[in-house]
Amino acid sequence: MRVQSIWRYPVKSMGGERLTACDVDQRGLEFDRAWGVYDPNTGLVLTARREPSLLFLSATVADGRPDIRTEDGDDVSTEAALSEWIGRPVEIRSAADGPATFENPLDVDQETDWVQWQSAGTTFHDG
């Protein structure tokens, strides 16, 4: 087996960063999906299904924190800047803070029958 590239996605549902090396532990790549965008009004960590605009952002890790940028390179790493960009109050949550609740549709084609589920509490990977 040959590894041709390593990609890490620090914030759930955002673009990530190409790495030349990365620490790996039992949870996977260090800082992979280590943060999520939390909606305090719903109590959910947002996914691209509910907030497609997340797909237009990219995140890297700088000094152990997510550095979030728009397609134009604008920095929206603070909760205030990210909230303004998304258009409603949001928070940046660490998966290390414990399990989070997400939602996805059972019928992905019609996007109906939304169900909620909880993360394992160590990363914000789907599963």
Image (cartoon, grey):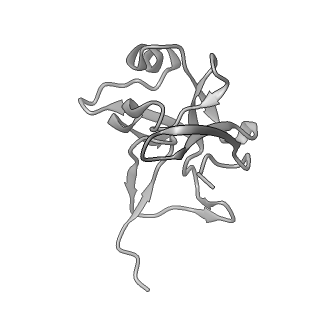
User: Image height check: is 99 above or below 92?
Assistant: below
- Which residue sits furthest left? 72
User: Image height check: is 105 above or below 52?
Assistant: below
Left or right, 43 with reference to 77: right
Residue at image coords 44%, 41% = 110
Q: Nearer the viewer, residue 66 or 125?
A: 125
Left or right, 18 with reference to 37: left
Residue at image coords 37%, 38% = 55
Q: Residue 37 placed where, x, y %?
A: 55, 30
Q: Nearer the viewer, residue 25 or 56?
A: 56
Q: Quadrant of residue 45?
A: top right
Residue at image coords 63%, 55% = 127
Left or right, 126 with reference to 81: right
Q: Residue 74 placed where, x, y %?
A: 30, 25
Q: Quadrant of the N terminus?
A: bottom left
Q: Residue 71 placed where, x, y %?
A: 26, 33
User: Image height check: is 82 above or below 4?
Assistant: above
